[in-house]
Amino acid sequence: MALTKFKVCPACGEHNPPALLECKKCETDLTGIKVVDEAILAAATAPTKAETASNNNRSLVKVCDCGKANPPQARKCSACGEDISDVRATETQASPQPMMRMAVLRSVDGSFSFVIDKPITVIGREAEMREYLEAKTYVSRKHAKFTLANGEIYIENMSSTNRTFVNNMLILGDAPMLLKNGDEIGLGGKLIKGERQSQAAYFTIEVSA
């Protein structure tokens, strides 16, 4: 009995019909992807020890402006959704990474929380936390970026309209700001006469020890 042929998406692993030029799940370009079956796939995914060591140390990635490293054939950034079809894949050398801390963003009313545990996290109405932020009209599509580095967490404003506030103070310029446990973050608004703006979003940050 003949085995079913398919193309394996390098970004998400989806098995696609041989005639497709884009992944039906994530729209990754499949132009140069070989058509395989289960037998060919099993043989191809059994690398030698030398190949395994080489792959562990070196790989090709597309790095988005937000800092996320994506598979070389990805067309959209998996972190922020940005079009990266024109970004050239570059070689990266794996190196031991320092242990990163974890942080939790918690809405001031306690109804929503979000764990930040990646090196780069972009939040906004069309990025991470979209399920909570999509109704907040003062929040931009990509509003702020969080960076975990050297055991610290930083926030950077990405909105040119309604901006980002920490403890009611505007983040100036594009420089990342170090966050501390208990800091209050305002996306698109701040306290005005003791009142929060309903179409902005407000969170406190809890940083793990």
Image (cartoon, grey):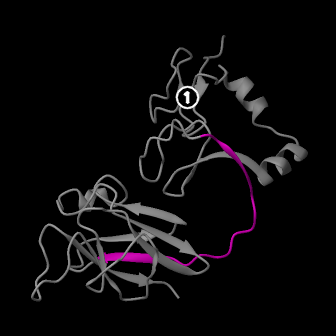
Q: Quadrant of residue 8?
A: top right
Q: Residue at horizontal 88%, vertical 41%?
A: 48
Disc 1: which residue:
15
| Residue lying at 53% horizontally and 14% vertically, measured from the top left | 19
Residue 205 lies within the magenta run: no
* 57 in relation to 172, above or below: above
Question: In terms of secondary structure, where does tag 1 sit?
Answer: strand
Front in this rendered view, residue 72 or 104: 72
Which quarter of the picture shows residue 172?
bottom left
Residue lying at 34% horizontally and 57% vertically, measured from the top left: 142
- Is residue 193 shown left or right of residue 184? left
- Indicate yes or no whether the magenta region holds residue 90: yes
Q: Where is residue 14 in the image (x, y as percent from the top left)?
A: 53, 33
Image position of 130 (left or right of 101): left
Query: At x 55% / y 28%, what residue is drawn?
Result: 15
Give the residues drawn in magenta, as a range.
88-106
Q: Residue reaching furthest top?
A: 1
Amino acid type, label 1: His
Q: Quadrant of the N terminus?
A: top right
The image shows residue 183 at horizontal and vertical percentages of 35, 86
Q: In this view, does 9 lie above or below 143?
A: above
